[in-house]
Amino acid sequence: MIRLLIVDDQAAIRDALAVMLDLDPDISVVGTASNGQEALAAVEELTPEVVLMDLNMPVMGGAEATGTLRESHPDLPVVVLTTFDDDDSILAALRAGARGYLTKDADRGTIIQAVRGAHAGNAILDPAVQLRLLDLASRKPVEQPGIDLTAREREVLDLIGEGLRNGEIARRLFISEATVKTHINNLFAKADLHSRADAVRLALALRG
Amino acid sequence: MIRLLIVDDQAAIRDALAVMLDLDPDISVVGTASNGQEALAAVEELTPEVVLMDLNMPVMGGAEATGTLRESHPDLPVVVLTTFDDDDSILAALRAGARGYLTKDADRGTIIQAVRGAHAGNAILDPAVQLRLLDLASRKPVEQPGIDLTAREREVLDLIGEGLRNGEIARRLFISEATVKTHINNLFAKADLHSRADAVRLALALRG
DNA sequence: ATCCGTCTCCACCCGTGGGTTGAGGGACGG
DNA sequence: CCGTCCCTCAACCCACGGGTGGAGACGGAT
């Protein structure tokens, strides 16, 4: 039996979920809460094994509550169930430590699967959320259109990105500091940079 | 009926998958290939609707083949099925544009679900892979243990991260350049920084 | 009333960085 | 063979950045 806590500010949805999920032979709904603060108290009192959390709630939102729970109960998995599927909400919830993310068009079976999965230590994400995560994971190495630096210039740029000074770069590359400056001036001209800070930003963006 | 192409260098696995999946009433295995190059040719010839791809193959690996397919057939979903579940393999495949990622302990039902999901436009990821993606998405704002800067110092740090110079920061915050320098020296001491480059790196790390 | 932290500002020093010009040698292709 | 590109180095200038010390004003805490 998985002890489940349901958190949602809308009583109708909260109760409907409670009834529906309690019917499952593996799940026991041990309580409900209508906002993040109540949820924190309920966790202490009812010791659930999984929390099903709405995001948009008064007093304390689901993301913040999830983050707080992460710190006080690192092993207590939180599954987010919400109507919002914009990038900000998803990232906020996942960064707060949510172990699952379902939108409210998920059917009973999906929700139960997610609760079981979270309890087993897995992450269950809505297919749309998975696609968004894929975007985030695959987006990184896309940009950087037209900057063709020589090999030496790239090396120097990388070291600038590491935070090294010209003298350190010179020793690292076994060249004189004058040469380092030359490379820097050349790559500054090519990439339209005007300060070391710009170069650091570029170097990090290139590696990202 | 979903027209499926199976790509795996191990004949036994390849054939076993073909037989197993062809039994499904919704799936028709239209062909197999034993490496990435063959897969590209097979896609042209057999016009599959979904590709089930192994990663570790001679001649041309699955990640490279997936990337090539992404460009030539953007709408053709590729589901990766592999024994490797290390971060590099996962990221390489997902960045190449894979629409699913299964490890080889996935059972028949899971694979079939993944093929159907990919065909429907969804992403189906192995639970372990989902956890890793969650890590990637949530890792960013986690670190930075003990740096408590004042509000003003954070503002200055942010602007340093934008690449602004002290004079520009001063004008932006309506304070004198001397004050900017003071804040910078203070936050340098707090965060153990010794150069503007370090500050840029920290500012970018903080923003993620 | 007092202390402490923060924000504000100033003056000084000097090292580094950004920009310039100029120049020599090695590699490659026409 | 000559031109071109890249890497290498040098001298110079001056602005900006980093470090130090000091100082006044404000607010909250004790």
Image (cartoon, coloured by chain):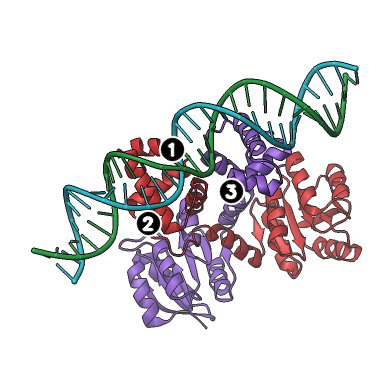
Chain colours: A purple, B red, C green, D cyan
Q: Nearer the viewer, residue B50 or B71?
A: B71
Task: Return the residue nearer the eye: B121 or B187.
Answer: B187
State the residue position of label 1. B165
- Residue B149 badge: 2
Residue closest to the eye, B136 or A31: B136
| Up-down relation of residue A74 to residue A105 (above or below) | below
Disc 3 is placed on an element classified as loop
Amino acid type at image mark 1:
Arg
Q: The disc labelled 3 sits on which kind of residue?
A: Leu
Distance between mark 3 and mark 2 Cα atoms: 24 Å
* Res A33 quadrant in image: bottom left
Residue A164 numbered mark, or none: 3
Neighbour class for label 2 at 10 Å: few (<14), some, many (≥20)? some
Dots 1 and 3: beta carbons under 8 Å?
Answer: no
Q: Which element carries disc 1, helix, strand or loop?
A: loop
Residue A182, percent across and down?
64, 33
Looking at the image, is mark 3 or mark 2 nearer the viewer? Answer: 3
Closer to us: mark 1 or mark 2?
1
Other-residue count near label 1 (Cα within 10 Å), few / some / many at <14 / 14–19 / ≥20: some
- Tell me the chain of label 3: A
Relative horizontal placement of residue D1, taking residue A121 as reference (left or right): right
Mark earlier in primary sequence (1, 2): 2
The chain containing the residue under callout 2 comes to B
Label 2 is placed on what type of residue?
Leu
The alpha-carbon separation of the residues under discs 1 and 2 comes to 20 Å
Vertical side of A183 occupied by B148: above or below: below
**Distance of mark 1 from mark 3, alpha carbons?**
19 Å
Is circle 1 on the same chain as circle 2?
yes
> Mark 1 falls within which chain?
B
Where residue B13 sits: x, y (%)?
A: 86, 65
Judge whether residue A18 can be spotted in this image: no
